[in-house]
Image: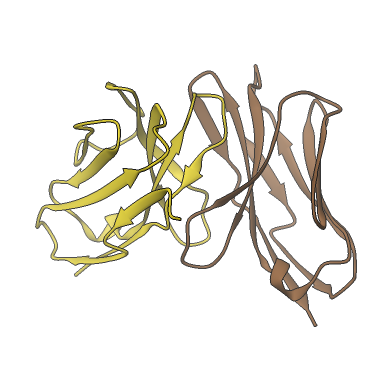
Chain colours: A brown, B yellow
Amino acid sequence: EDQVTQSPEALRLQEGESSSLNCSYTVSGLRGLFWYRQDPGKGPEFLFTLYSAGEEKEKERLKATLTKKESFLHITAPKPEDSATYLCSAKNGNQFYFGTGTSLTVIP
Amino acid sequence: DAMVIQNPRYQVTQFGKPVTLSCSQTLNHNVMYWYQQKSSQAPKLLFHYYDKDFNNEADTPDNFQSRRPNTSFCFLDIRSPGLGDAAMYLCATSRLMNTEAFFGQGTRLTVV
């Protein structure tokens, strides 16, 4: 069954404490792996697209990586404004599969 | 500069009373999507348009319909809203089927 699983469901970090969010996928014929940030009551905001294993993308304190089975979103020295839910989505053919997200809280 | 605009942001409707949610885009993207997202759940794709070609997900209830009169606009019609249809409805666009999606701010639907 094609699906996307994110872990952990929730993560609390002290400001400056680096960590990683995991996205495991069992989507056949992957056409793209997408990371989004979603703030409460708002639509998801696009962060990264990864298309092939070994690919990496960086933006400020965030870095996304991709293997054949999973993707990681690394957060380096997070700040309170990084608090949000991070969604992962995998695409094959015409189907988008979303995970349920990791809710990140960064404590000052 | 909002690129995907959803109206209204909040909608309250009565049980069984038809309601329409709207979405417009300034990106000139080919693909437009409607998602339903309930609290702490992943967005669930209801349907999408590639240009004028409509694609309905197999498990989307018949109660949900969509219209795309032109490239810029897309509407979600809920013919007879039930209490279980209360959710955030997200519109998104993408240039192609395998490129990133840009989401609107969503419409929070409450059914009373």
**Compared to B13, does A8 lie above or below?**
above
Towards the viewer: A75 or B42 = A75
Q: Left or right: where does residue A107 sit relative to residue B47?
A: right
The image quarter in which residue B76 lies: top left
Residue farthest to the front, as pictured = B1
Q: Position of residue B96 (x, y in %)?
A: 49, 24
Is residue A1 in view? no
- At x 65%, y 16%, the residue is A29
Q: Left or right: where does residue B108 sit relative to residue A54?
A: left
Q: Position of residue A89 (x, y in %)?
A: 61, 39
The image quarter in which residue B65 lies: top left
The image quarter in which residue A10 lies: bottom right
Towards the viewer: B10 or B43 = B10
**Compared to A43, does A96 lie above or below?**
above
Where the C terminus of chain A falls, by quadrant? bottom right
Q: Left or right: where does residue B35 sit relative to residue A66?
A: left
- At x 25%, y 49%, the residue is B22
Is residue B109 in view? yes
Towards the viewer: B31 or A101 = B31
Q: Position of residue A54 (x, y in %)?
A: 86, 27
**Compared to B11, does B6 lie above or below?**
above
**Compared to B26, does B53 lie above or below?**
above
- At x 13%, y 65%, the residue is B14
